[in-house]
């Protein structure tokens, strides 16, 4: 029984139609691919200029027949209530709605029409299929966060059940918690691992201390897929040694799709089926393959919400071996997250703060940008830019949420600023630890 596919269909996402469409796209010949991409680019721009008042006002000088006239949009451009950004005919009830993680420090709520979201899942299933994985059959060991409120918690647990996965929470990466993880691998026949890079590294370090290779404990394990954070080459080598299986690197964005996925030839293959990816310089000019610049992406199928020439906030390089149908991402700069080390010795993945800062993320556009810094084991500073100062009630709620996810006795400070310091890439790092662990 294809439980995963049935759950998508039950939720109104036409997965069969999307998989057929994806197959048709992938069968387009190399010589015809430029025509396909250009037609989709023009179609999506024309659609949103005609049916999305927000985009029509934003791109008032755009000419769908001249790509150079299409303006680049940033996350800051999208920080206004979602219902003011949706295309005509779409509302909260007939679209897929979610929040970005805020890993760039600029969070917002987004939407996809149901076919677009189904196409996202069709592509994910396709890429995982490169490694013999089937979402309806393969058992996943999932290293992700999970909401602690009852509704959010049980919703994620239901999704885990329907997706044939067991979730290991990254909120606690202590030795005791990791020992429990190891025991689970001894009793469950997992086919693959999937989750945040930093959490995987912490688990691998635990295995190294115990002088254990995971594959010997869990012989059914085939592959480990890491996402959401930068995977450095030395970490990849270390993970493969300790897990005993290939480590596959995924680069994606929740508001878009998989952006790039490591193929079996060890190339970071860019998604050219549902996205159009460009590398631009500071003047928004397209750079030749092999040159470093801003990653700007167009979602070719999202009719509910425009993501057209969308600056995702990362810097990268497309390989000179790239073709329009098969672009290769040679290098990605950014997306690293630190581990928070707390007074008790407990560790938590940097993306723990995705869930904590949900208290900050609102659709009223008050908080524009934020970062969190750990200055001492018990001291965190939330720096933010907003229209109004956070209320005492909001500060209390955020502080309580941080202690609930992490531990009691933490000192949380809040600083409202006019600007936030950015990295060389122009991206804000959501969480930074300024303390050094004593080995």
Image (spheres, rainbow, N blue to C red):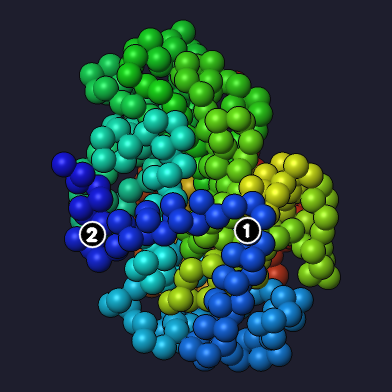
- Check disc 1: other Cα within 10 Å, few if <14, some if 14-19, many if 20+: many
Is 253 located above or below residue 341 in the figure? below
Residue visible at 79% across and 44% down? 320
Query: In the image, which is nearer the foreground, mark 1 or mark 2?
Result: 1
Q: Nearer the viewer, residue 375 or 119?
A: 119
Question: Where residue 151 appears, x then y in whole percent?
Answer: 21, 59
Q: Is residue 380 left or right of residue 356?
A: right
Q: 260 left or right of 16?
A: right
Q: Nearer the viewer, residue 65 or 178?
A: 65
From the viewer's perspective, is residue 47 above or below residue 12?
A: below
User: Within the image, what quadrant is residue 10 found in?
Assistant: bottom left
- Which SS class for mark 1? helix
> Residue 12: x and y, percent?
25, 66
Where 237 falls versus 417 (above or below)?
A: above
Q: Name the one closer to the observer, 218 or 389.
A: 218
Residue beneath disc 1:
33
Q: Residue furthest left?
A: 1
Looking at the image, which residue is at 31% across and 41% down? 135
Whether residue 364 is visible here, answered yes or no, is no
Question: Percent from the top left, x then y, of residue 200?
Answer: 47, 31
Residue 111 visible within the image: yes
Q: Residues within 10 Å of mark 2 (few under 14, many from 20)?
A: some
Tell me the number on the disc at residue 9.
2
């Amino acid at each position: 029984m294809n439980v995963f596919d049935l759950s998508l269909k039950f939720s109104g996402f036409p997965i069969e139609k999307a998989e057929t469409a994806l197959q048709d796209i992938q069968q387009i010949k190399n010589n015809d691919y430029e025509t396909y991409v250009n037609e989709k680019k023009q179609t999506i721009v024309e659609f949103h200029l005609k049916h999305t008042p927000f985009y029509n006002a934003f791109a008032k000088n755009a000419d769908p027949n001249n790509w150079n006239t299409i303006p680049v949009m940033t996350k800051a451009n999208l920080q206004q209530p979602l219902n003011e950004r949706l295309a005509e005919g779409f509302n909260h009830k007939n679209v897929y709605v979610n929040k970005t993680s805020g890993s760039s420090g600029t969070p917002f709520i987004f939407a996809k029409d149901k076919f677009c979201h189904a196409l996202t899942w069709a592509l994910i299933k396709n890429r995982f299929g490169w490694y013999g994985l089937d979402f309806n059959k393969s058992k996943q060991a999932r290293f992700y966060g999970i909401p602690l409120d009852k509704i959010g918690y049980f919703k994620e647990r239901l999704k885990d059940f329907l997706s044939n996965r067991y979730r290991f929470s990254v909120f606690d990466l202590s030795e005791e918690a990791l020992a429990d993880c190891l025991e689970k691998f001894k009793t469950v026949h997992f086919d693959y691992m999937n989750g945040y890079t930093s959490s995987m590294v912490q688990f691998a370090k635990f295995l190294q201390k115990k002088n254990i290779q995971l594959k010997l404990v869990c012989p059914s394990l085939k592959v480990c897929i890491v996402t959401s954070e930068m995977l450095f080459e030395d970490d990849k080598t270390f993970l493969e040694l300790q897990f005993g299986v290939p480590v596959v690197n995924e680069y994606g964005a929740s508001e878009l799709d998989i952006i790039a996925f490591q193929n079996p030839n060890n190339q970071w293959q860019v998604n050219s089926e549902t996205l159009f990816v460009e590398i631009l310089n500071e003047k928004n000019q397209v750079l030749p393959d092999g040159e470093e610049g801003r990653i700007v992406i167009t979602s070719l199928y999202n009719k509910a919400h425009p993501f057209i020439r969308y600056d995702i906030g990362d810097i990268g390089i497309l390989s000179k071996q790239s073709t329009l149908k098969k672009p290769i991402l040679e290098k990605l700069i950014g997306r690293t997250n630190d581990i928070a080390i707390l007074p008790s010795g407990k560790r938590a993945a940097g993306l723990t703060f995705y869930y904590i800062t949900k208290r900050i993320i609102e659709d009223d556009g008050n908080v524009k940008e934020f970062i969190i810094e750990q200055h001492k084991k018990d001291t965190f500073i939330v720096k933010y830019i907003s229209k109004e100062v956070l209320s005492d009630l909001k500060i209390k709620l955020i502080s309580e949420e941080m202690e609930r996810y992490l531990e009691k006795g933490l000192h949380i400070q809040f600083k409202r600023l006019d600007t936030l310091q950015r990295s060389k890439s122009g991206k804000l790092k959501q969480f930074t630890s300024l303390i050094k662990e004593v080995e």
